[in-house]
Image (tube, helix red, strand yellow):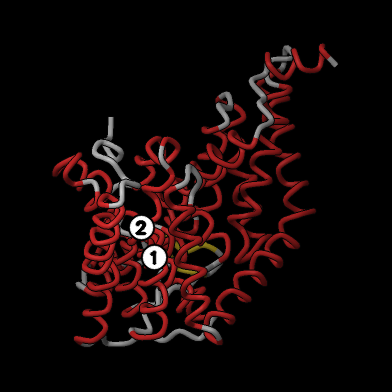
Amino acid sequence: MNGFQAFLKRKNIVISARRYGIDALGAMAQGLFASLLIGTILNTLGTQFHIGFLTTQVITINQVGYTIGGLCSFMSGPAMAVAIGYALQAPPLVLFSLVTAGYACNALGGAGGPLAVLFVAIIAAECGKAVSKETKVDILVTPIVTILVGIGVAWLIAPPIGGVANAFGQLIMKTTELQPFWMGILVSVLVGVALTLPISSAAICSVLGLTGLAGGAAVAGCCANMVGFAVMSFRENGWGGLVSQGLGTSMLQMGNIVKNPRIWIPPILTSAVTGPLATCLFRLEMNGAPINSGMGTCGLCGQLGVWTGWVAPSEQALANGAMAITPGAFEWLGLILISFVLPALLTWAFGLFFRKIGWIKEGDLKLD
């Protein structure tokens, strides 16, 4: 047993919740961002602003034409797999071989491809790392093992994982349609919490394919945490903190949350208010790429996703019955209130109350 543990240590194979549930999941979200999300944005910009080079089909694959943005989205599986391998500190031959495994996962997993990529890329990367540089023909052995393991595992588990992820996502979205108030609270709070925790809310939303009202509730929860913490901590962190949290991530507050969990109550309360307002009053739907549902105000990706869903719904949203609309003043008002105004005002008010009763003290929200 000691010999096996020594082998794992030598190969930098760390079997832990942090390595797989935080590092790998977070990297997967970055891979999604750099492929599917960017592709969706480029396609939308090209279509809405009539930018020729963004709407021109630059290549045809299997009689299907792809724009620049379309190619970005097409390569989301390989991008996620390589990102996961990078997070697992895979050596070069393993890292590059994961491209094939990632493509296989997306092809076999359908809508649940991102979740399949997470599992398959982890297994393939760790197997590749295990044999890396163990033979004199490493340049052959390592890629072959990584690719065969990746495709084999993808063939076995990608279709059922894709089916389960898709079914669970559909359940959440259908339940939100039937019970918009209670599910608005639940989805908003849980996704907002996931965004602030050191895991990836964007990856979770993408895995579940959250669009429609459920996606809108997720956007509300993320904005409540990001804008909420940014405004509530303004006296401690100033403009730098406002930008880094409001347009970056509320995850920066995790160290302070560990020291005083009560500082998290105001944003959570805010998400419990804005979530049902998004689903019941404004009927805010996020029909862009599902990854946008878990982005909040990070680079304004949540808002871009809503806008994209209005003018050019994603394939997953279209499959769920979404249609392109021309947004009016009410839609824009709802987006602005849910994304910025209400998170700022409500979290500031809740935070002021908790400061007065002594649950939040001066310096509790200070970023290092």
Camera-side residue: 314 or 342?
342
Camera-side residue: 101 or 137?
101
Q: Which residue is mark 2?
A: 267
Give how far across and how far down residue 107 sits, in percent. Answer: 64, 59
Checking the image for residue 170, the label placed there is none
Instruction: Give the quarter of the figure containing the C terminus.
Output: top left
Q: Badge 2: few (under 14), some or many (20 or more) residues near its Cα, within 10 Å? A: many
Is 260 left or right of 343, judged from the image as shown? right
The correct choice, above or below, for 362 with respect to 267 in the image is: above
Is 298 left or right of 74, judged from the image as shown? left
Is 64 left or right of 254, judged from the image as shown? right
What residue sits 54% from the left and 67% below the top? Answer: 209
Disc 1 marks a residue whose amino acid type is: Ser
What residue sits 75% from the left and 39% below the top? Answer: 149
Whether tag 2 and tag 1 are in contact, CB under 8 A, the answer is yes
Q: Which residue is mark 1?
A: 271
Q: How many marks?
A: 2
Give how far across and how far down residue 291 sits, in percent. Answer: 45, 60
Camera-side residue: 34 or 255?
255
Give how far across and how far down residue 72 sits, in percent. Answer: 42, 55
Q: Is residue 201 visible?
A: yes
The correct choice, above or below, for 55 with respect to 120 in the image is: below
Picture quadrant where residue 56 is located: bottom left
Picture quadrant where residue 9 is located: top right
Q: Badge 1: few (under 14), some or many (20 or more) residues near its Cα, within 10 Å? A: many
Instruction: Give the quarter of the figure containing the N terminus.
Output: top right
Is 129 left or right of 307, judged from the image as shown? right
What residue sits 71% from the left and 66% below the top? Answer: 164
